[in-house]
Image (cartoon, grey):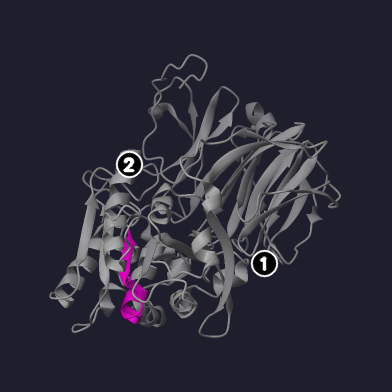
Amino acid sequence: MNVRSGDMLPDRVNWAKFTSLAWIGREGFLYSRFPEPEEGQDFQALNYNQAVWFHRLGTDQSEDVQVFATPDHPERSHYAEVTHDGRWAVITSAVGTDARYEVHVIDLARRAKEGWAARPLVTGFDNAWNLIEGSKGGLWFMTNKDAPRFRITATDLDAAQPKWIDVVQQSDETINAASLVGGRLIVSYLKDAASRALIFDFAGRQVNEIRLNGLGTAAGFRGKPDDPETFFSFASFNRPSGIYRMNLATNETVPFILPKLTFDPERYVVEQKFYTSKDGTSVPMFLVRNRAAAARGQALPTMLYGYGGFDISLTPGFSAVRMAWLEAGGAFALANIRGGGEYGKEWHDAGRRANKQNVFDDFIAAGEYLKAEGITTPHGLAIEGRSNGGLLMGAVTNQRPDLFDGVHAAVGVMDMLRFDRWTAGRYWVDDYGYPDREEDFRILRAYSPYHNLRPGTAYPWVIVTTADTDDRVVPAHSFKYAAALQATDPAGKPHLIRVETAAGHGAGKPTDKVIDEGADVLAFLAQATGLVPPDGTQ
C-alpha cells in the first residue's frame, strides 16, 4: 500500500512463510519464501529449500531475483535484514528452532559491481547472533557465545582486519533485546521474566535506566542511530500496550498513544510468586487477581497458563480474553517454567529433549502451589496452553488428571512420534528430539499426549481447539487426541473439540474469530471451575 495516498499496489508475493520484509530504499525489499508446493499440499507439505529473494516494486513475482540459498542444505532457513543506513543486508541462517545461526553479509554499496555477493561473517551454527543495527561500517550483535545470558559485541567491516569488540558484558540478568538509537545502546533485560531497560554508551558504560510502570513488558525502543528520541511500548496483565516517547538527552518519558479503557486497571494487583518444583528448582510465577480479594485472602477460580519451550520467554502482557476472565471474578497465573528463555540458555536446556519432563514437573508444581496456598478454590483450577503449550496441557493432564479441573489445549502438538512428518514439524527436533532415533523415541513415547491416554482414568473437563488450515501444527494432532480422549473416557466429563474454519495457527486471526473462540473457551472453563460472573450468569 502507498501510505501517502492509501492506494493498494498490485504487488503480490506467495509462499512467503516465516519471513520479514527488509526494504532497500524505495526500490523493493528482500523476503524469504519456499518453493510452490505440489497441488493439494498447501497445508501439509514439509517446508524445505527456503531462500531469500528480492522483489522490485511494481513487478510480478516471477521477475524476483534469488539472493541467497543453500540448495545443498535444503533444511536450512534464512531471513534477511537491512541496516538503517542502507549499507548492509544481513542474512541469518538456521537449521531448526534452536538459537544457533550462521550470518552472511551483502555490501549494498557495492551491489552495482558485485551483485548480491554474500560473504560469511559467522559460521558453524554454534551460537545465537542477533543483529542489533549497523552504523558507519560497523555491525552490532547480541550473542550467547561464551555468554548464556547474552552479551553485546560489534565489528567494523570496513577495517583491514575486522575484529569483534565486546561492548556490553553478560550480567546476572538475561539480555532480551537491544537497539541503537541516538548514539546510545538501549538494552532490554529480563529480571525474573519482567522487563528492565538500561541505556549504555558505546564504551559499555551505563548512563541511565528507563523507569517503567511496575511489572510488565517494555519493547520496541525504535529509532535511527542518530535520532534524539525513541518510542517504546509498555504493557502488563492489567494494562493494554501503550506507546511512550522518550527524549534521550533528558530521559523524559511521556505517553504518546494510550488506549481507552473500559475497566479500571487499579482494581487488579499484579504479583510475582516463587515456588519450588519437584527437583528443588525455584520457578517464578505471575499472579493477577482482584486487589480487594487478594487483600482478604479470598480463593478464586484460577486460570494457569504455561508454555515451556523453544527458548521463548513468557512476559507480562495484556489479553482482552483474560481480562474478561478477571472481570468475571477469576484469577490468572502465568508460570515461567523451564524450557523458556527467561533465564537464558541454561533455563532453555533444562526443559528440552531429555529434560522435557522438567517442564511438566514445573507446571504441575505451579498447580499444586496455587491449591496449597489457597489462591484457587479446591475445584477451580483451569489450565491453558497453545502450540507447544498445547502439548504441555496434554502431558500434564495425563500425568495429573486429579489436579486440574478444566483444560484448554490449543493447536497443540499431541502426537510426538510423528510430529516431524508435517509442514514445519521438522524444525522442532531441536527441542523434542528425533522420533526415528531409539533414545529420543523412548523419551517422546513416555510423555506423548496421544499415546499416554489411559482407559479407566477420570479426566477433567477438556476443550481442544484447532483450525482447519493450520500449517504450523496441523489439525491432525488435535483430531487424533480429542478422538482418543473421548474414546478413553466416554462416560466422563465433557471432552470437546472446537475447529475454526479458514484460520491458521493463531497469528493474524480476525477479531471476530478471536472473540468467538474466547467466549466459547471461557464459558467452558467457567463451567468446569464453578466461576460465576458478578451478574450471576453462566
Q: Which mark is residue 36?
A: 2
Q: Is residue 181 left or right of residue 483?
A: right
Q: Quadrant of residue 488?
A: bottom left
Work out whether mark 2 precedes mark 1 in sequence or the reverse, and give the earlier one.
Answer: 2
* Residue to which mark 1 is pinned: 148
**Helix, strand or loop at mark 1:** loop
Q: Quadrant of residue 138?
A: top right
Q: Position of residue 393 (x, y in %)?
A: 36, 69
Q: Of circles 2 and 1, which is in front? A: 1
**Can you say whether 195 is above or below 11 in the image?**
below
Q: For this rendering, which residue is in front, 26 or 479?
A: 479
Outermost residue, top direction? 5
Q: Give the CA distance from mark 2 to mark 1.
A: 38 Å
- Badge 1 crowding class, 10 Å Cα cut-off, few under 14, some 14 to 19, many 20 or more, is some
Q: Amino acid type of disc 2?
A: Glu
- Badge 2 crowding class, 10 Å Cα cut-off, few under 14, some 14 to 19, many 20 or more, is few
Q: For this rendering, which residue is in front, 343 or 255?
A: 255
Q: Is residue 440 left or right of residue 38?
A: right
Q: Amino acid type of disc 1?
A: Pro
Q: Which residues are magenta?
A: 394-411
Quarter of the image with the C terminus in it:
bottom left
Q: Which mark is residue 240?
A: none
Q: Is 399 colored magenta in this rendering?
A: yes
Q: Position of residue 498 (x, y in %)?
A: 23, 55
Q: Position of residue 441 (x, y in %)?
A: 36, 79
